[in-house]
Amino acid sequence: MFGAELVVAVLDRVPDAVIDGGWGIDALLGRVTRPHDDLDLVVDLARADATAEALRPLGFDLSVDERPTRMVLARADDRVDLHLVTPADFGRTQVLPGGQRFTYVLDETGGVIAGHRLRCLSLAMQVLTHCGYEPDE
């Protein structure tokens, strides 16, 4: 499982990333609500290679490369899922499979994980990013 201290270590190496997904919700709540298999991060596409390189010392290597949509960095049982975005008029846009686009509105907020204040998506953006598919347990 992807622990809270590892989240902090990853964000120390990639401070411009914004937390999304389950850890993003937990950051907003300020507590761990469940075990997490991965860490979802919103990262600028132009910084994708630099992000992968920054996480290499923590043992993460490129596992999936689906640019311009996403990249997955993995080590043993841990994964970092990079949601790759480019600047847009109202935020950052992610190109989805099939050419559709999703815009992350720049309403980032601060959250807390393991006592550390970290950047995460707002509650409203968290809800939007989880619409349109059936979430797993």
Image (spheres, rainbow, N blue to C red):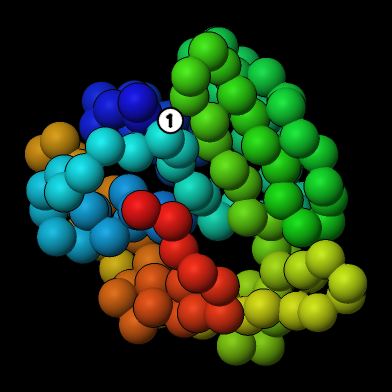
Secondary structure found at label 1: helix
**Picture coordinates of residue 20 (x, y %)?**
43, 58
Q: Vertically, is 99 above or below 65?
A: below
Q: Is residue 132 left or right of residue 109?
A: right
Q: Is residue 3 left or right of residue 74?
A: left
- Residue 91 picture location, percent across and down: 59, 79
Above or below: residue 96 compared with residue 64: below
Q: Locate the N terminus by quadrant.
A: top left
Q: Outermost residue toward the right? A: 98
At 63% from the left edge and 30% from the top edge, which residue is drawn? 73
For residue 106, say whether it is visible.
no
Left or right of 105? Residue 120 is left
Task: Give the left or right position of residue 52, taking residue 117 as reference.
Answer: right
Residue toward you, 85 or 40:
40
Label 1 sits on residue: 10
Q: Amino acid at mark 1?
A: Val
**Residue at position x 75%, y 79% in the image:** 101
Against 2, is 113 above or below? below
The image quarter in which residue 49 lies:
top right
Foreground residue among 75 and 11: 75
- Name the residue located 78 percent from the left edge and 69 percent from the top edge: 95
Residue 121's quadrant in the figure?
Answer: bottom left
Decide which of 136, 62 is in the foreground and name it: 136
- Tell me where residue 113 appears, x and y as whole percent: 20, 43
Relative vertical location of residue 66 with respect to residue 1 in this rendering, above or below: below
Q: Residue at x 63, y 73 (%)?
A: 92
Estimate the x, y position of residue 122 in percent, counting from the top left.
33, 73
Q: Is any atom of residue 61 visible in this view?
A: yes
